[in-house]
Amino acid sequence: MVANKTAERPLTAKPVVSERASSGTGNLALDARDVHVFYGDFEAVKGISLPVHEKEITALIGPSGCGKSTLLRCFNRMNDVVSGVRIEGQILYKGQDIYASQVDPVAVRRRIGMVFQKANPFPKSIYKNVAWGAKINGFKGDMDALVEKSLRQAALWDEVKDKLHQSGLSLSGGQQQRLCIARTLAIEPDVILMDEPASALDPIATSKIEELMLELKENYTIVVVTHNMQQAARVSDRTALLWLGELVEYNDTQTIFTNPSQQKTEDYITGRHG
Amino acid sequence: MIPETNTNFNPRLAARQRLGNIWQGVFLSSTIIALIFLIVLMLNIINSAFGLVVLENSIAPSELSEQPLESLDKAALVDILIDNISRNAGRKLERDQRFFADSLAFEGQDKWDEVCLRDEPPSGCSGAARSTSDVLVLVYERVVEQQVIETYPLWQSLTQGNEIRAQVAEEFPTATVEFWSWLDRNFITSPMSSDASLAGVRTAILGSLWVIVLTIIIAFPIGVGAAIYLQEYATDSVLSRIIQTNIDNLAGVPSILYGMLGLAIFARTLGYFTSGQFLGVGAENGRTIISAALTMSLLILPLIIINAQEALRAVPNSLRNAAYGVGATRWQMIWSHVLPYAMPGILTGTILAVSRAIGETAPLLVVGAATFLTSDPTGLFSKFTVMPIQIFNWTSRPQAEFRNIAAAAILVLLIILLTLNTTAVLLRNRFSSRR
Ligand SMILES: Nc1ncnc2c1ncn2[C@@H]1O[C@H](COP(=O)(O)OP(=O)(O)OP(=O)(O)O)[C@@H](O)[C@H]1O
Ligand SMILES: [Mg+2]
């Protein structure tokens, strides 16, 4: 049966990007156009075009090492700070190419926040972890309120409200990850890029994060990398499958999980590959 | 004993454990050898810094007065001086600093008034009178004229004290034997003297402190700044690699070459500035504190840069990413996160470099440290001497007592080093605990 299907659908097909996924109804928050990323001579992302819709959750899935994190980092120019990286193509944010020469990457990162794959709180107090980004970006409101709001949003407030001045590193791995999320929320970005935000969390914290994402969707655009198929299915509006640096299929999540047009996609989501 | 049942493996556990134990023993003996060296060094210094001395007086204090000299008042002490030193020597002392505020001891009133009306009156005309303890010192120096005729190291003094006393009583019937610590308060507060029992290290300590503090002020910001640039800003290019290689090599250049460089550039070429002449003050040539500090800065700059770079390199990239991720500029990232994280390492490197600078002798000899200086340094443009040079000078003298005070000076140097290091370590720990 499996062999049959493989025969019907060639593995090396052109990426299938559905009409709806690429045009969609809402506005585009981000639009990657033929993006290539090279680490030295190694091409980690091989010409991916991926429109990201406003106020939606877009999930990037794919086996380990396929370039999900690399692509995600392109969206807020975090790859700029890696030495030996070369990026080709365009990424439009509100119609403006963020790689254009006059664009300041600092401004890009302030609008497009990021939660990293490994929790990396600052070696400072919990309070400062949340407040620092807002402070350097000239936040003018009530800092205490902002810190509380961000920590509440990240479902961390109850656990840390009595020890705001302890080091962020004294928290558990999962708490640290939520602290990083709170830190990103505190700068109130337009887009939040999340690289496996729940990989170190227990099921309860994970579901809190997922609820949080659904809540944030009201105001923010989210791009999330995940290895957890159920999570992608539960929270995302659209899903893209990457494979060895290429985009295999991009469609709305419903379609990807119920009626994928690519053999690889079906194999991957049912667990027959990576 | 858990037997190995899998025939594919032959763990030879006993042999592996034995090899491990042998290496552990090797490392332990290395540690012990290093410790022995250190202990021998310390014992050697302590051995010379304390011990019995044989003293002989020109006139015994008991011949001068029935009571001990220490209990006499100033007038009685001055009387002893009047009886025992020449009138001329007494006048000279009085012109330097008078004995009584209201009367004269050696000079006639008429002559005194005349001397004080001259264009450049001696300091005795205006200054305060000598204190009783000053006069007591004078009595000891000029009348009792205590001389060290023999010294014994600590070990010998402790083990053969009685033999030494017996032998001395036989050979020098008038001499006394005392146990001396060459390191005492007088030693630290007295300036240089050609008499070992009167000489002290005050001038050298002040010289060392001036030079070191200035060196830190100059070298630390420049070194850390260069390290930040090389590590955080410079892109990997041929030029930056050449610079890096050069810095690494400079750290290995013999220190005497830095001395020659310092002499040529700071003391000679820039002599007009380093002597302070451009301000109209200071020394006649560029062999001054500021030249020494600049030379020392040159010497330790590569060390500070390399150590600071190492510390910056150890800052995890995830921390940099975290800062960039919330929209920080490169400078905000460095200032708020990278530098605090790296500061303990930077300070450790700086401590090592500064410790080295405190002990350096050769470059400062070349730059022109004075080996016999009695006036304290007062500013950037003073002539100077430093502790290691004082020690070097004393150890090369033929008289045995100078080796004793050299040992005492080494102890002082070690204490200074220890204090500086402790301060720096405390500072470093404060930074670490703030992480
Ligand atoms: N800094 C780097 N230098 C060189 N190669 C890199 C670098 N970062 C990633 N790569 C390579 O790029 C490819 C994609 O890496 P990336 O981290 O994007 O994978 P990923 O899809 O996020 O994997 P995972 O799910 O394991 O996180 C990998 O083959 C990796 O070896
Ligand atoms: Mg990844």
Image: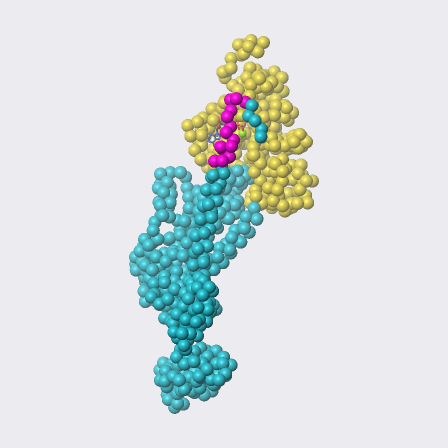
Chain colours: A yellow, B cyan
The quadrant of the image that shows the N terminus of chain B is top right
Q: Does residue A138 appear anywhere in the picture?
A: no
Q: Is residue A83 left or right of residue A52?
A: left
Q: Nearer the viewer, residue B412 or B422?
A: B412
At a point 61% along the width and 28% down the height, the residue shown is A56
Does B302 sit above or below residue B316? below
Does B148 sit above or below residue B6? below
Does A35 sit above or below residue A143? above
Asked if residue A54 is among those painted magenta in the image, a careful observer would answer no
The x, y position of residue B267, in whole percent, is: 32, 60
Q: Does residue B40 appear anywhere in the picture?
A: yes
Question: Residue A186 appears in which quarter of the rendering?
Answer: top right
Q: Is residue B17 left or right of residue B56?
A: right
The x, y position of residue A184, in whole percent, is: 59, 38
At a point 32% along the width and 59% down the height, the residue shown is B366
The part of the chain drawn in magenta is B6-19
The x, y position of residue A189, in whole percent, is: 58, 37
